[in-house]
Amino acid sequence: METGAKAGVITRVHEIYIKASQAQIWEAITSPEWTRRYGYGGLVDIEQRPGGAYRYKADDMMKKMGLPDIIIDGDVIESDPPRKLVHTYRWLFSDANKAEGYTRVTWQIETTEGGFCRLCVTHEMDNAPIMAAATVAPFSLRGGGGWNWILSDLKSLLETGSRLHG
């Protein structure tokens, strides 16, 4: 779902339901042992406190492609394990990505009456058209897929132990 009434303001909300506990999902989004196993495979490094650093480190394959050691940076705004994480988010892939500046990502994990959890990722991308386009791109082994693919891959891994591909 996309919202945004003003020019340059884009907010996308991605929801997915996962048969896992809040604690399992929290661990999967905040632990490098998990983040290396789904999505693009980078290694998250989070200081889980307001003002703490949020970094995503390139894995060996990404480095071989010429990406920097740190591919995403930001700061933690709010951390309420295992329910909510809010942080700024900036790509460091290119000068154009850096120039767009920081966006804001909110992760909310809620237990449902059905015994599974709802994971909602809200990405506020004010004046970040490159990121806005890329975060909803269709899946491609060359790097596309955005949040829809990342969250689907996370769901598959948590529920079955296997990724969507590879």
Image: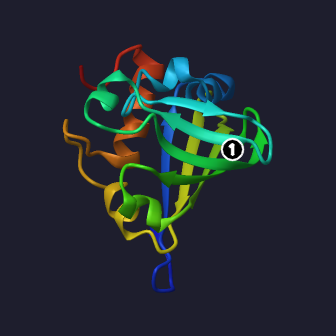
Amino acid carrying label 1: it is Leu
Tell me: 128 left or right of 116: left
Q: Position of residue 123 (x, y in %)?
A: 53, 58
**Mark 1 = which residue?**
85
Identity of the residue drawn at 57% across and 39% down: 55
Position of residue 30 relative to residue 12, above or below, is above
Question: Which quarter of the rendered picture does the N terminus lie within?
Answer: bottom left
Position of residue 37 relative to residue 17, above or below, is above
Identity of the residue drawn at 19% across and 35% down: 141
Identify the secondary structure beneath mark 1.
strand
Residues packed near mark 1 inside 10 Å, few (<14), some (14 to 19) or many (20 plus): many
Of 143 and 81, the residue lying toward us: 143
Q: Position of residue 132 (x, y in %)?
A: 39, 64
Tell me: 67 left or right of 127: left
Question: Which quarter of the rendered picture does the C terminus lie within?
Answer: top left
Position of residue 130 relative to residue 116, above or below, is below
Q: How many marks?
A: 1
Q: Position of residue 46 (x, y in %)?
A: 66, 34
Identity of the residue drawn at 80% across and 46% down: 50
Q: Position of residue 124 (x, y in %)?
A: 55, 64
Identity of the residue drawn at 50% across and 48% down: 15
Visual colour scheme: rainbow
